[in-house]
Image (tube, rainbow, N blue to C red):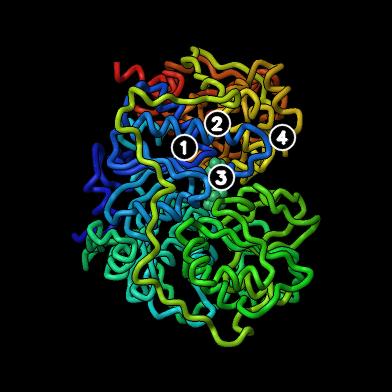
Amino acid sequence: MGQNLTQKILAAHLVSGDLVPGQEIAIRIDQTLTQDATGTMAYLQFEAMGVPKVNTELSVSYVDHNTLQSGFENADDHRFLQTVAAKHGIYFSRPGNGICHQVHLERYGVPGKTLLGSDSHTPTGGGIGMIAIGAGGLDVAVAMGGGAFYLNTPKVVNVRLTGQLKPWVSAKDVILEVLRLLTVKGGVGKVIEYSGPGVASLSVPERATITNMGAELGATTSVFPSDKVTKAFLSAQGREKDWVELGPDADAQYEEIIEINLSELEPMVAQPHSPDNVAKVKDLGKIKVDQVLIGSCTNSSYADLMRVAGILKGKKVHPTTSLGIAPGSKQVFEMLARNGALADIISAGARILESACGPCIGMGQSPNSGAVSVRTFNRNFEGRSGTADAKVYLSSPEVAVAAALTGYLTDPRKLGEAINVTMPEQFLIDDSMILAPAQDSSSAEVLRGPNIKPLPIAKELPDQLTGTTLLKAEDNITTDHIMPAGSKVLPLRSNIPAISQYVFSGVDANFAQRAQEAGGGFVVGGHNYGQGSSREHAALAPMYLGVKAVITKSFARIHRANLINFGILPLSFVNEEDYDKISQGDQLVLPDIRKALIEGPELTLINQTTGKQFKVAHGLTGRQIDIILAGGLLNFTKASSR
Ligand code: MIC
Ligand code: SF4
């Protein structure tokens, strides 16, 4: 039986386990990436592991999230990241060099390699034929130390592309169509593998737009074959030697097949407040648009912005609409500046932002009250823009620029003739903003400012877990609910005592205080608890506040792994209706827990307040049980390397 591309790459990196869907495997990681908002913790964890130099083929540390320096905190973090990278054999991409996923695709992505990144949009690398997976910082730290990455073998879904995109329709519309078909939960436990004759018509950055936003499906990752188009991209980046041809066998098997005819797609948007709330632009009424933002790791490539510049050329932004543009990388920015496209953008009245995540993570450009904001980004969760009542639509650059010019959500096909951009034969290559690690690491000093507080470490699991139900939450709690981002909270990512005061602050302002006064306790949640980002702060900060177990109807993949990594027990109700048998404030007990975890998949939970008791399941593998018993992955890794 033939192999699909996912199986081929996983098999070539398999360290333990069998490639049977649902079973745990361990894979070797060739490359890692971190960004600053998750990276400071990842490097503190790496330091705590005591490994002098990274054991990967390549590890890169990017600064792109916390670039708004409104106090000393972010600058302190940048300096720490630069010096810790120099010491431990890590390449450092300076602030201003661009968004991690865009830069990594341009300068480091290699078909057939594995990439683990402490950011949920790491699957961008799938556009160049990598198995690129998002994970918590601690998993990335372990991979940097040479440890394997553990995951459940995913099912592989084949999205077969036929036809060719029509003018004004773009890669973003392809992934919006996949989101419409599969929904935000439809990719859980799966890899989305693209194939078919339509693939050849998509450039590498277009493919990367599609794999990037596969994160919004909840998928483990997404991947495209590596073909002549990939070769041309690598050669234009001066890296033809990195090319290998890769694809599925002709008789490859898939768990599920979906056909999409590119020729039939039309311009679309994801409406507020979920990336799968997809509609055709032409079917929506007259919607006034207050703000348009173009950029983010989804849509800020050279071709994206050349098309935007081409459409804006000689025109002016609508007087009641603000247009902001953040080029994805220094390479893109400088090429636009040198060929004059930047002048067309400026002349049209756009506000130019630095090459960084910026407004995508609420770092500035929050829209006005009740605003409609059209963004080429990948997430439109309520409040993420920094304005609680803003309505965010996700779109292609073409739809975004049409809104910026007309002031309304507009089908871009009404703008006339489409702009054709050909991919350059040679990109502008200048890696001077990427610093190589120190040759002699003994003289490299790691500089820490007062914002960088030592890493809190969990204790071994006690024999019994007792505590109060600190919070009872609904379905679809995102990591933005658990640990908010934005310009006020993000600078505290290296200071767990300080950031822990914001845990659940948008849901329940007194959570942190209550948790600390109670000496910790339990959190109860509904379905899909922890969807969204890979931020391990959504586990680390609750752990600091004393949260011992989270009991839900179901979890999102990366967040569940993060809870385990920090010694918090993720438990699920065996009977969903037992969710109703716990109220906030109830006193809960998990007796004889160390023994019970080893003995079987189910535990008894006693609600002392009501006198009722019921079953909860842990679903942990043997290795995960050992991690929980040790009080987290860091303790476990240290103990097993002794
Ligand atoms: C995001 O898009 O939510 C982020 C910010 O990039 C996060 C990482 C983080 O919280 O630092 C992600 O996607 O993993
Ligand atoms: Fe940055 Fe936004 Fe991409 Fe996250 S989704 S990495 S915040 S650009």
x, y percentage for residue 593?
A: 48, 18
How far is mark 2 from mark 3, CA to CA?
20 Å
- Specify whether residue 562 is in view: no
Give the left or right position of residue 572, taking residue 323 as reference: left
The secondary structure type at the circle numbered 3 is loop
Q: Going from the N terminus, do you reach mark 4 or mark 1 first? A: 1
- Specify whether residue 220 is in view: yes
Outermost left residue: 1
**Quadrant in which the N terminus appears:** bottom left
Q: Residue at x 56, y 29 (%)?
A: 494
Outermost top residue: 463
Query: Which residue is disc 4 drawn over?
Result: 505
| Vertical comparison of 142 with 434: above or below | above
Q: Residue at x 54, y 39 (%)?
A: 37
Q: Going from the N terminus, do you reach mark 1 or mark 3 first? A: 3
Q: Amino acid at mark 4?
A: Ser
The secondary structure type at the circle numbered 4 is loop
Q: Is mark 2 within 8 Å of ligand 1?
A: no
How far is mark 4 from mark 3, CA to CA?
21 Å
- The answer to the question of whether label 4 and label 3 lie on touching residues, with beta carbons closer than 8 A, is no
How far is mark 4 from mark 1, CA to CA?
22 Å
Disc 1 crowd rating (10 Å Cα; few below 14, some 14-19, many 20+) is many
